[in-house]
Amino acid sequence: MAEPQLDETLDSTQRNAVLAWLVTVILAALAVNHGLADSYRWFAFTWFAVAIVLLPVAAFRDPLAMPPWELLVLVLLPVADATVLGESPLTMIAVYIAVAAVALVAIVEVDRFTAVRMNYPFAIVLVVLTTLAVAGAWNVAQWLSDATFGTNYILDGRSQDAANYALMVDFAYAALAGLLAGAVFSRYFQSAREYADEIDRTPTQEPQDKTANSGTGAVPSLIRDRLDVPDRTVRLLSRVMQVALAVLLLYGLVTRDPTTVTNSAIALGITFLPAILEDDYRLPLEPGLVFWLTAAVFLHALGSAGLYGVIGQWDSVTHTVSASIVAAAGYAVVRAIDLHTDEIYVPSRMLFAFILVFVLAFGVVWELAEFAIDWSAQQLGMTAIVAQHGINDTIVDLVYDVVGAIVAAVWGSFYLTDLSQRIAGRLEG
């Protein structure tokens, strides 16, 4: 019975490849058409989609290594809509359907053609995060094009605030499209897994012992071993910043400054998170990581107290440090889940991409939350706890989010492995 089933799978694979190639050729033709019509955004986006589709074909030198053709139709529909209607409001919504579809294709390819293994919940979350990350990267790319080549994609004749409002609406569409893409992915997840079981195109197999590639044993202290700073000094610096936050909180209360009070109180509360994790969840963090977290919230609290307005680059510094914390948390959690269950496997070389996706998606969600808080405060006649200052502020924040992600991605494999193993141990318990 195995041979007829395999023959049927091969026939299905060939049929899928023919249809997928047909859709891909149409996408390439539409990309050329967008280029001739000077619609460079859609020209670049469509060729990017084609490159994602053909990546497994190039990697395996196999024309049958194509994603499900139905998913490519989801990419094709918005591109065709842009060809017919041009830059209409409907097309601006459709672009994020295309973004979600491309993210969907990318995740299907990762699961089908690489050593990465995902269970259903992990895959759905990753589809949503990838959609948000692609939306963020796409807008950063347009902003860089405006700054470098003098195009006008982001502002488009609007003021900074109006363009920022439009971007937030676009991000909201991207979030919705990501959720819809996650729902659609459930239709293809099982079939993709069955295909991988029948015809294995994975270049490397999952190791029998995951801890072999995750670094066993003690991990060098974040600060002590690299900067030769004793743990006692690192703890003292963390305590000094906590005291400074408490003083800042009292100052805000005396001057009746709600922004300073709120930001310093939240920051001070976050600094006690490591102690809670250690006491209540038996998850000790090394002093260097505690210092890292405390420094991030301390710098933000100082910025909210006035340094954001005095020092132009202070916001960029805080975003970089905060993004590195988010990236570190993402690294530790993903690696812990990887160690905890056999259903999920993420090779070390893939973690860098996962961290970038995680941080960019978190950056988009944070900008949406920041906008919602700012807008709500304006409607209520209150002072916003956090505020946005135009499109450039938002995009630059996302750029520095990526910088922080790269820092954490490079250092994560050295300094966060032990934390990941402790989290995995707690999951086992």
Image: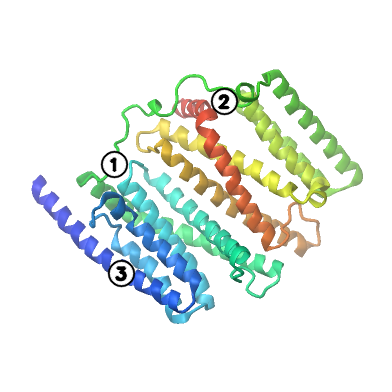
Q: What label sits on residue 203 in the rendered view?
A: 1
Residue 109 in the image: state x and y as whole percent.
34, 52
Circle 3 residue: 25
Of 289 and 193, nearer the camera is: 289
Picture colour scheme? rainbow
Left or right: 97 in relation to 368: left
Residue 185 visible to an observer of this rendering: yes
Circle 2 packing at 10 Å, graded few (<14), some (14-19), many (20+), is some
| Amino acid type shown at disc 3 | Val
Q: Residue at x 68, y 55 (%)?
A: 370
Q: Which element type, helix, strand or loop, lies under badge 1?
A: loop
Circle 1 packing at 10 Å, graded few (<14), some (14-19), many (20+), is few
Mark toward the start of the polypeptide (2 vs 1)? 1
Residue 127 in the image: state x and y as whole percent.
44, 52
Q: CA distance from mark 2 to mark 1?
A: 36 Å
Residue farthest toward the bottom in the current orientation of the protein: 84
Q: Which element type, helix, strand or loop, lies under badge 2?
A: loop
Left or right: 323 in relation to 339: right
Q: Are marks 2 and 3 in contact (CB under 8 Å)?
A: no
Q: CA distance from mark 2 to mark 3?
A: 53 Å
Circle 2 residue: 283
Q: Are marks 2 and 1 in contact (CB under 8 Å)?
A: no
Vertical comparison of 368 with 307: above or below: below
Q: Which element type, helix, strand or loop, lies under badge 3?
A: helix
| Amino acid type shown at disc 2 | Leu
Q: Residue at x 28, y 57 (%)?
A: 66
Residue 279 in the image: state x and y as whole percent.
62, 23
Circle 3 packing at 10 Å, graded few (<14), some (14-19), many (20+), is few
Of 17 and 403, nearer the camera is: 403
